[in-house]
Every structure is written in structure tokens, then in C-alpha cells.
């Protein structure tokens, strides 16, 4: 029996997974158009590599990074590039971002593919490059570029590879269905990760409310040297730091990475995508997403192409529009309400909940904090939610930062247990945003100061140079003046005499030449027959 | 009796000579060049170099503050800069002096390039060298370096420089602050110090 640890805090929200985990995985219908945001990952947005009107094949690279952190975007099916334009994207702000809009031609023609069943012979660098080129960014929700995580893992000794199948958030069953139905593919992906990192131990952590997934994974992983461990159901055990704590007892340092404690953690969906990319040259162009909520007639999980509009998925799942209160992307704890159903599925979207009126309960009226301390006992990061709240609310963001605000994983456990129904996480998000903005402002100010000072120094230098030149000219003029003044007294007569002598010499020369000419004329006129005296 | 008095005086004289020499050496050895307070104040100013405070740049204003000028003359810094300065100098925070302008969202200068005649006047006006160009050639603003100070707008003879407010996108979006509830008392900037016990949250 594998030894398990516990993390502090945690809550037991109603799971509501039965809504969507009974139906088998379906493939979503091909939509009329696919909307591909250029940034679906942590880092810089990718830049477009195609032109409007261009025909592309399934799996073609449409956008890639010009440098910096990120992953490319691929064509989920064959078709033509319709537009490159601002379009609503799934983001809590509800704002638009630059997207590539692809019109499928329905043929679903693949580009040339080169499967690598013998990837071990290609060497780890080539395999990592292939993972990057396949556009894989953490499918668990954060969207961290997977190749970077793996590269970081290869630079440090890794003794444990954790595959995260905990899926602790209510409603979501995407990883559950993936593990049940595609356990062999997931294990193939884990084998690639194992080969890259060579960990002493590989553990798949699955919450014990998913017995079928545990059985399926245990069966598939029987001979692969992979432990499949059931972890107690407790939100948020699927958080990376929490799962590492449960399975290894180690704590990832504040602001640090799991690789610092010898652990790399990958989501089940990411492992599957890595396997597909390396073995079959199949880039990340689709993902499993849970469509659930009581406003749907047929909730369940679908494999949807990246870029499929949420509206299409909702229609496919039998949305009862008259019974819809709002759409939530992500789970009920960490998700956000969608402003429009035009937004596409991205690499990080794992769930859409069509919330019926009253499904999440009546919104409670916020009351003043009564300092009960429930939030502190629920916090899985052992922060002080109450103190963070006071400081965030009174605008003392730097004090909140001193209390490790940036360690908050925004899991929402504190707000869930709050008897006063205070939207604590919103306060933390706002405070984090303010602090980030201040940091950016400070960076800009420092840059401006540097440039201002450099300019001042340059102007000063130019002024001094000008001054120096002016002084030099003035000195030269003064010297000339002085010489003139001195010369007026003594050396001038000599000068004049010398000049007069020169003039005399010149005159003498001229006279001599004239005399010669006269003499020659005389001789010529004396003997006119002689044309040339030399012939005499 | 006199001997002890002489000894006491002698010891004190010797001590004062030793410590005097020590202090004199320290004052010379550990001398701080410039005014450290000016650096601290300058670090809190937004470095737009816009001159709205009436001084030719942020550092001159920092020097003026160190000499006792008011701390509320910086519109780009806004209330947060005033609060930080008040904290540093241990003085009362004051509301922004409207005479010097109002706080605005971040802006950048944009040159309408087909109208630019290449006169270089804006280049000379830019305090952070954020405008690129040469005589009789088109000029352009390096957006990342622009502090939005407005100083290039006035000198342009053909009025081809616009100040554009930087749009919010998903990368610089600030999550909204939850609404206050009936029992909240948000301390205003000036109240924060005067009425601390009542104004700060319980």
C-alpha cells in the first residue's frame, strides 16, 4: 500500500459528477468555423504564419512564436483561413483577443505525418522539440508549455513523475472519461514522459470517487512500472502542489517549481497529448471537454476540436435555452461566467456548465466578516485568508503580498466556507492584478528614468563639447590677435624687406627674359636666310 | 587634589581627541555623495518626465520635494504616488492639486506617419528619446518607451501627433474589485491618517 500524506484544509463540495460521467465519450460535430486564439498558453501570443484565404491541411502549423515562451497553434481540420481578427475568447474579462478563423472544408485531410514508434532512437532533444512543435500546453487548466516543464525537469534530478488524474473540482469528468476509455493511450504517453525524465517512481493519482477510472488505469498500467493510487476525495487535491504533497509528502517552496523538490506533475490529458504527438505525429488539435449542467438534455463528455464555438457544443448537447441562467467555463469553484457563447474551446478549457436557474443556489447576500476563522482552516496553502481580505479590501496590497498573497491558488475553498458569503477570491484576484500592474508600472518607470538620465547625460556631454570647441576657437582667435599685435612692432620690417627682395628678384628675372627675347630677335633679323641657327 | 582634577581633565581631553578623530575619519571615509532622500523620492515618481509639476522632469521635482515643496503636484503618479511619498516623508497625504492636471489612464503618443514632415522638433522635445527619425525623414514613436508625457504634441508644426489611451486587453486586464457592502467604510486618502482608528477596517 502506497503511503499517503495529507494537505492542510480542503473542503467537500457536492460533487455532481454523476450528471456527466455516465455517458461515453462522443466526438463533437464539425462546426461551420473554428476560432483559434493565438494565445492559449502561458507566455507570449503566437504570430500568424499563414495568410487570409490560404488553404491549410489538418495539422498544419498556423501560428508560432517569434521567440519567448509559448507553443504553436495548428489547424484542427483542413480548410481555408477565413480571417485573422479580434474575437471573444474564454477569459474572465470577456474581452476579445486576436484569433485565426478557419472555415473547414469537411474533407478532414491530414498533412503528411511521420509517426515515431521508435522515438527512443531519436534522442530526447528531438522528442522535446516534437512536443513543443505539437503545441502542447498543460491541459489541466493553467496552460504552461509542456516542453518547458519537461526541459526544466531534465535539468534537475527527478525522482517522481506524478500524473494528475485527481480531477477534484465538482461537475468535471473529462479526465475521468479519458482514463476510463483511453487508458492505453494515456499509459503510452506516460511511457514517453518516463523515458524523458527517468524517474524512480511514477504515480497516477486519482480521487477515490472514480473507481472505474482507477480500475481501467490499473489494468492498463499493470506492466508499465506505474503505480495507480487512489487518493481521498477532498477539494482541491487536484491542485499540483496539493497532489505532490499527498503523494510524496513534499512541499513545493513558495514561488518555486515542483522540479525543485524532484517532482514533475503532468495532467492525464497532457500525457495523452504527448503520447499522440510523439508516437503518431498528431499535434494538439482536439481535447476532451465536459458539457454538463442541468440546463442540458444530454450532458456528457465530448472530444471537440480546439476552436469549436461553445454555442455549437451546447446545441449538440441539447441545451434548453429557456432553462439557462448562465454558462460557466471551468468548474463551479474556479471557473468564470462566459459573456457570450461565441467563445471557442481552447487547449485549457476542460468544462462548460450550462447552469439552470437556482442550480448553484440562491446567491447569498454578503455580510460583514465575523472573524470566525473558517477560511483559515479551509485554506490548502495555509495562508491567512482573513488578513489577506482586510488588506486587499483596504487597498494595502503590499501588506497582502507580505502575507504571501501570490501563493494563493484561487481554489475558492475560503469563499465556499465563509458564513458571511464574502467573495474572498475576487478580492485576492483584484489585489494580485493591482500588484502586477504596479510592478509593470515600476518597471516602466525605471526604464524611463534610465532613458531620461541617459538623455540628460548626452545633452550635457554635447553642451560641454560645444563649449570646448567654442573655447578652442576663441583661444585660436586670441592667439592670432596676439601674434598680430606683437608682429606690428618688430618682425614686420624684415617681412616687408624680404617681400620687397622677392619682388625685386621677380622683376630682375622678368627683365632678363625680356632682354633675351630682344637679343634673339636681333640675331634673327641680322641673318634672315638662316631659319635655324643650329644648322650652321 | 589637583592631581585628580588634572587626570580627569586629561582623560576627558584624550577621549574627546580620540573620538573626534574617529568621527572626522568616518565622515570622510563614509561620505554619501548626493542626497539619498532625493533618490528615494525619485524612485516613487512615475518618471513620465512630463513637467506637469512645473519642474523639468521627475528628478528636479524630487529635489524640490526634498527641499520642502508640496507632494501633490504629480498627476501621472496619482493618489498612489502621493500616498507613497507621504509615507516616505512622514507628512499628511493631500489630494492631487488639480492645478497641475488630473490623473489619466496610460497613454502613448502616435505619429500619423503620412503627415509627418520630418522636422525633428518632437525628437528634441521627447524627454526619454522615444521618437525615432531624422531630418526630412518620417518619425515614429517607440511605443514601449513612450511615457505619454504630451511634450511632443505642442512642438509639432503639422499637428500629426495623437495621444492614444492604451486599450485594455486580456493581458493587462485588471480583475474588478468586488463592490463594497453597507457596513464598509472605505477610508479616503486624507482620512486614513487623521481618523485611523475609526476609518480603518475593524
Image (cartoon, rainbow, N blue to C red):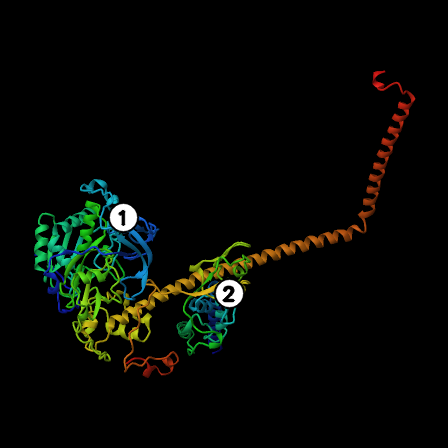
- In the image, A324: left or right of A24? right
Q: Secondary structure at mark 2?
A: loop
Q: Can residue A24 be seen from the camera position used here?
A: yes
Quadrant into which the C terminus of chain A falls: top right
- Are marks 1 and 2 in one subunit? no
| Residue plotted at (58% across, 58% down) | A463
Q: Can residue A197 be seen from the camera position used here?
A: no
Q: Secondary structure at mark 1?
A: helix
Label number found at residue A257: none
Residue A475, percent across and down?
68, 54
| Residue plotted at (81% across, 51% down) | A489
Residue in front for this viewpoint, A247 or B181:
B181
Chain at tag 2: B
| Residue plotted at (65% across, 56% down) | A471
Question: Dot 2: within a 10 Å radius of its alpha carbon, few (fewer than 14), some, or many (20 or more) residues?
Answer: many
Most distant residue in the top direction: A536
Q: From the image, tell me which residue sits under label 1.
A: A133
Residue B45, percent across and down?
44, 68
Q: From the image, tell me which residue sits under label 2.
A: B153
Most distant residue in the right direction: A526
Quadrant into which the N terminus of chain A falls: bottom left
Amino acid at each position: 500500500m502506497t503511503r499517503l500524506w495529507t494537505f492542510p484544509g480542503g473542503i467537500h463540495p457536492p460533487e455532481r459528477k454523476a450528471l456527466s460521467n455516465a455517458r461515453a465519450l462522443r466526438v463533437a460535430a464539425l462546426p461551420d468555423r473554428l476560432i483559434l486564439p493565438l494565445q492559449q498558453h502561458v507566455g507570449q501570443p503566437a504570430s500568424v504564419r499563414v495568410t487570409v484565404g490560404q488553404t491549410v491541411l489538418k495539422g498544419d502549423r498556423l501560428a508560432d512564436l517569434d521567440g519567448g515562451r509559448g507553443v504553436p497553434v495548428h489547424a484542427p481540420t483542413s480548410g481555408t483561413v477565413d480571417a485573422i481578427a479580434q474575437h471573444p475568447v474564454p477569459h474572465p474579462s470577456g474581452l476579445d483577443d486576436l484569433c485565426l478563423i478557419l472555415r473547414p472544408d469537411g474533407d478532414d485531410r491530414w498533412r503528411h505525418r511521420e509517426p515515431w514508434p521508435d522515438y527512443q532512437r531519436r534522442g530526447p532533444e528531438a522528442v522535446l522539440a516534437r512536443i513543443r512543435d505539437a503545441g502542447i500546453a498543460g491541459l489541466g487548466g493553467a496552460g504552461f508549455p509542456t516542453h518547458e516543464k519537461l526541459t526544466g525537469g531534465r535539468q534537475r534530478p527527478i525522482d517522481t513523475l506524478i500524473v494528475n488524474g485527481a480531477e477534484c473540482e465538482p461537475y468535471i469528468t473529462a479526465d475521468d472519461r479519458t482514463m476510463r476509455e483511453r487508458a492505453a493511450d494515456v499509459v503510452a504517453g506516460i511511457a514517453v514522459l518516463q523515458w524523458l525524465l527517468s524517474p524512480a517512481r511514477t504515480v497516477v493519482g486519482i480521487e477515490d470517487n472514480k473507481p472505474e477510472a482507477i480500475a481501467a488505469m490499473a489494468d492498463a498500467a499493470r506492466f508499465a512500472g506505474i503505480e495507480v493510487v487512489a487518493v481521498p476525495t477532498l477539494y482541491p487535491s487536484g491542485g499540483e502542489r496539493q497532489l505532490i504533497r499527498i503523494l510524496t509528502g513534499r512541499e513545493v517552496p513558495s514561488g518555486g517549481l515542483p522540479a525543485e523538490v524532484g517532482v514533475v506533475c503532468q495532467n492525464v490529458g497532457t500525457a495523452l497529448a504527448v503520447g499522440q504527438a510523439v508516437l503518431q505525429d498528431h499535434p494538439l488539435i482536439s481535447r476532451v471537454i465536459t458539457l454538463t449542467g442541468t440546463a442540458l438534455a444530454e450532458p456528457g463528455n465530448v472530444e471537440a476540436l480546439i476552436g469549436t464555438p461553445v454555442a455549437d457544443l451546447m446545441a449538440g448537447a441539447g441545451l434548453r435555452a429557456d432553462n439557462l441562467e448562465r454558462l460557466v467555463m471551468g468548474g463551479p469553484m474556479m471557473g468564470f461566467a462566459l459573456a457570450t457563447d461565441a467563445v471557442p474551446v481552447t487547449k485549457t478549457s476542460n468544462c462548460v456548465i450550462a447552469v439552470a436557474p437556482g442550480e448553484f443556489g440562491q446567491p447569498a447576500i454578503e455580510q460583514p466578516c465575523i472573524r470566525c476563522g473558517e477560511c483559515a482552516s479551509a485554506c490548502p496553502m495555509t495562508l491567512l485568508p482573513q488578513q489577506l481580505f482586510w488588506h486587499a479590501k483596504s487597498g494595502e496590497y503590499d501588506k497582502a503580498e507580505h502575507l504571501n498573497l501570490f501563493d494563493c491558488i484561487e481554489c475558492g475553498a475560503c469563499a465556499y466556507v465563509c458564513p458571511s458569503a464574502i467573495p474572498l477570491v475576487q478580492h485576492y484576484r483584484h489585489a494580485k492584478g493591482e500588484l502586477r500592474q504596479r510592478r509593470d508600472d515600476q518597471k516602466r518607470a525605471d526604464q524611463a528614468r534610465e532613458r531620461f538620465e541617459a538623455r540628460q547625460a548626452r545633452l550635457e556631454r554635447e553642451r560641454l563639447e560645444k563649449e570646448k570647441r567654442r573655447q578652442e576657437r576663441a583661444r585660436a582667435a586670441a592667439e592670432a590677435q596676439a601674434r598680430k599685435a606683437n608682429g606690428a612692432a618688430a618682425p614686420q620690417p624684415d617681412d616687408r624687406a624680404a617681400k620687397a627682395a622677392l619682388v625685386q628678384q621677380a622683376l630682375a628675372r622678368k627683365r632678363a627674359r625680356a632682354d633675351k627675347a630682344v637679343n634673339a630677335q636681333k640675331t634673327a633679323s641680322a641673318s634672315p636666310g638662316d631659319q635655324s641657327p643650329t644648322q650652321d | 587634589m589637583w592631581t585628580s582634577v588634572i587626570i580627569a581633565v586629561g582623560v576627558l581631553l584624550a577621549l574627546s581627541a580620540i573620538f573626534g578623530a574617529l568621527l572626522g575619519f568616518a565622515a570622510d571615509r563614509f561620505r554619501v555623495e548626493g542626497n539619498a532622500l532625493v533618490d528615494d523620492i525619485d524612485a516613487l515618481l512615475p518618471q513620465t518626465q512630463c513637467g506637469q509639476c512645473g519642474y523639468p522632469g521627475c528628478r528636479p521635482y524630487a529635489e524640490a520635494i526634498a527641499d520642502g515643496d508640496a507632494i501633490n503636484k504629480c498627476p501621472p503618479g496619482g493618489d498612489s504616488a502621493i500616498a507613497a511619498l507621504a509615507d516616505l516623508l512622514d507628512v499628511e497625504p493631500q489630494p492631487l492639486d488639480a492645478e497641475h492636471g488630473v490623473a489619466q489612464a496610460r497613454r502613448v503618443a502616435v505619429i500619423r506617419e503620412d503627415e509627418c514632415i520630418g522636422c525633428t522638433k518632437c525628437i528634441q522635445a521627447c524627454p526619454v528619446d522615444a521618437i525615432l527619425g531624422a531630418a526630412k525623414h518620417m518619425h515614429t514613436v517607440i511605443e514601449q518607451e513612450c511615457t505619454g508625457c504630451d511634450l511632443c504634441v505642442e512642438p509639432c508644426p503639422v499637428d500629426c501627433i495623437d495621444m492614444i489611451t492604451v486599450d485594455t486587453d486580456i493581458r493587462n486586464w485588471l480583475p474588478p474589485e468586488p463592490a463594497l457592502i453597507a457596513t464598509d467604510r472605505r477610508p479616503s486618502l486624507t482620512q486614513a491618517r487623521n481618523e485611523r482608528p475609526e476609518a480603518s477596517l475593524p
